[in-house]
Image (tube, rainbow, N blue to C red):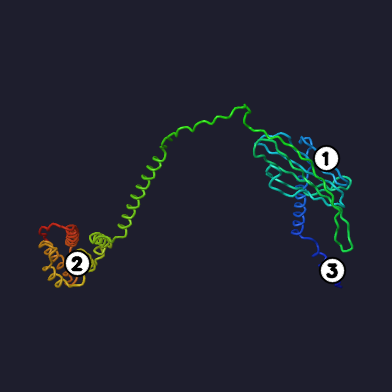
Amino acid sequence: MIVTCSSPWRKRRIRRSARPGPASRICVATRLLLAVLIVGGCSRNEAPDDEAAFEIVKTYEQGPLRVDLRVERSKILVADRLRVVLEATAPESHEIELPGRSEKLGEFVVADSRAAQPRLVEDGRVLHHRSYVLEPFLAGEYKLPPLTVRCAQKQPRASGAQEMAAQEIATEEVTIEVASVLPQTGQQPQIKEIAEPVEMPSPWWPWVVSGVALVALAAALIGWRRRKQLDQEALAPPAPHEVAYRELEKLLAAGLLERGEAKLFYLRLSNVLRHYIEDRFGLRAPEQTTEEFLVELRQSQPLGPAHKELLQSFLEHCDLVKFAELEPTCGEAETTVTLCRRFVDETKYEESSTLDPVSTA
């Protein structure tokens, strides 16, 4: 690196920036590892075959070209595969052309064909390697056809192109015997008749699974309907008598009588019963005065005479406390609350029985 800056500090800074960082070192290490793996894989793929594993080995030489043909076996079965290896070596100044890929070699079917990368061997020669995996179709005598290898020397020309002086070597035809996997008895094999169809036993587990599924579906349906009913009940407004009971308990818990607020107590007690009558029978009790309500009450059909008389006495007694400044005793207040609760108890049903005449204090 050439630094043209005159400042020493800037020179030191540039030198430090030129040093490889951790990311650069990791990248270099990764590339070296990939290179080692690729070289190792290539060396494994290009490893020479063991000649002892081949039954037929033939060598052909012509000039600088040498061709080696190796056939795994001369006798195989129909179910076997036959491996054939073709190798050619020539000096580096020559080019070698091996037979290309093909689907068939004679009557054999080519199941696999692979060519290894050329590699340098002894005496500066280059080795070219191709292997075949062949499969027979029927039993009989097969002929492995000649395999032709071409070689040409590179001759440089003034134009920069290369002129090839070609020569070729063709291997000999090899005979392979393919035997059948069936025993050779000399008799025609007998074909047995097709057996009668056998009725398969009916499995039991589909019925069990179907039964369990039906039970689970029924349980889910019942649970869904129950939850829906509970939700409807939770969303439904409370009944008029439930509201009246709740408001009456809140009034008694407020302690108005103990604090001497009888007028407010009777006002709220009267409102509890008036709202109950409006919600239960549809009479506009909260919006009317006592006189107006009593006139409408005499013409109403849902209430019997005893209930009407009870309401009249109850409302008149409340008005005396609210407007006439009547000071009720504790017994009178308890009796008034009891009458209010009894009226709600006996009129909360759709078909309520007629009250007996009630005496008021």
Left or right of 232 in this view: 140? right
Residue hosting label 2: 282
Secondary-structure class at tag 1:
strand
Left or right of 131 in this view: 125? right
Q: Quadrant of residue 211?
A: top left
Discs 3, 1 touching: Cβ within 8 Å: no
Sooner in the amino-acid sequence: mark 2 or mark 1? 1
Q: Quadrant of residue 178?
A: top right
Q: Nearer the viewer, residue 8 or 200?
A: 200
The x, y position of residue 96, in whole percent, is: 82, 50
Question: Dot 2, crowdedness within 10 Å: few (<14), some or many (≥20)?
Answer: few
Q: Mark 3 or mark 1: which is in front? A: 1
Sooner in the amino-acid sequence: mark 3 or mark 1? 3
The x, y position of residue 116, in whole percent, is: 76, 48
**Compared to 270, does 142 lie above or below?**
above
Q: Give residue 11's mark.
A: 3
Question: Dot 3, crowdedness within 10 Å: few (<14), some or many (≥20)?
Answer: some
Cα distance in 3D space between marks 3 and 2: 102 Å
Cα distance in 3D space between marks 2 and 1: 120 Å
Q: Residue at x 83, y 50 (%)?
A: 151
Q: Give residue 207's mark.
A: none
The x, y position of residue 200, in whole percent, is: 43, 35
Q: Nearer the viewer, residue 294 or 46?
A: 46
Cα distance in 3D space between marks 3 and 1: 67 Å
Q: Residue at x 72, y 49 (%)?
A: 101
Q: Quadrant of residue 8?
A: bottom right
Secondary-structure class at tag 3:
helix
**Compared to 84, does 158 lie above or below?**
below
Amino acid at the residue labelled 3: Lys
The x, y position of residue 320, in whole percent, is: 16, 69
